[in-house]
Amino acid sequence: MTGEDLFLSDLHLDERSADRLAALARLLDGHGRRARRVFILGDLFDAWIGRKQLAEPYVVQAADAIRLLTGRGVEVHFVAGNRDFYGLDALGRRTGMVTHKRGFAVESFGRRLWVCHGHELLVHDRRTHLAQRVTHSAPVEWLFQSLPARLSTFLARGYRNHSGRVVRHKSSRMLATGDEAVLALFEAGHHAIVCGHTHRLAHTVYRWDDREGHLWILGSWEDGPNFLRHGPDGWHFHRMDPAG
C-alpha cells in the first residue's frame, strides 16, 4: 500500500478520548507512514479555537503523533471543519500540516478530487451557514483570541452544546448533502468528492448524461475509528478496533 492517499474526518478529540487518540497514533504510525499523503477533513478536535489549546495534554498527544508523521516526509493536509474556528496557522506550525480554511481540489491516481469537511454541502441548512458567518468572522476571532483561555474554552463548549441541541430539531433535508452542490462540483470537473461532517459512513454514485461521480463520506470517530484510502487498486473504507 505504499504511496496511497488516506482520508479521515470528525475525530472530535478532547480530554475524554484516550481510545481515539491511541487509534490515531496507531493509524499514523502504520498506514500513515506508508502513505504519500494524509488528509484530515475537519473536526480533529471537538472544538478548535486557536493556539491557547496547544498546551492541552490531548492536543499535545495528537500534535506529536502528526508531527512524527510529517517529520518522516509524509504530506499531511488539514481542512477546517465547522468546529475549527480559529488559529489554523498555529496548528499547522505545531504539527507540520498544511492547513486549509476551505475545501480544495487535488489529483489522486489520475482522478481529480474535491476534498472538504462537508458542512458547506448542506445547502438547505441556511440558518447554520448564517451563524457560521458570524462565529468565523475576523472580529469574533479577535475577541476569542484576546479572552483568557478558560473563558474562551467555556464559550466554545457552550456554543458546541447549543449546536448539538439544535441539530436534533433539524429536518432530514437540512442535514443531508445537497445534490445541487454535489453535482456542481462534478460539473466543474471533479471525479469524486471526499468529505465528513454528517457522521455517516457512505458511498453514493451519481450518474447523469453518461457520466459518473462518486461521493465518499467518512464517519465520526465517536462511532469507531475509520478512514478511507485511495490507491492504484481503487477506494477502500477501513474500520479500526478502538482498543487496538
Image (tube, helix red, strand yellow):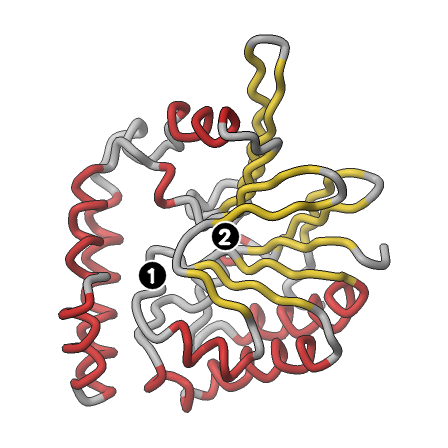
Q: Nearer the viewer, residue 144 or 164?
A: 144
Which mark is drawn over residue 241?
none
Identify the residue position indicated by label 2 in the image: 220
Circle 2 residues within 10 Å: few <14, some 14–19, many ≥20 = many
Q: What amino acid is at disc 1?
A: Arg
The residue lying at 43 percent from left, 68 percent from top is: 45
129 w.r.t. 87: above or below = above
The quarter of the displayed image where residue 38 is located: bottom right
Query: Which residue was labeled with disc 1?
Result: 83
Q: Quadrant of residue 91?
A: bottom left
Q: Quadrant of the N terminus?
A: bottom right
> What residue is at 19 percent from the left and 61 percent from the top?
135
- The secondary structure type at the circle numbered 2 is loop
Residue lying farthest front? 188
Residue 107 placement, left or right of 102: right
Farthest-out residue, top? 209
Q: Earlier in the sequence, mark 2 or mark 1?
A: 1
Question: Is 54 on the left-hand or right-hand side of 106?
Answer: left
Q: Residue at x 30, y 66 (%)?
A: 85
Coordinates of residue 150 in the picture (x, y in percent):
22, 86
Q: Amino acid at mark 2?
A: Ser
Residue 43: percent from left, percent from top? 43, 61
Mark 1: secondary structure: loop
x%, y% of residue 199? 46, 46
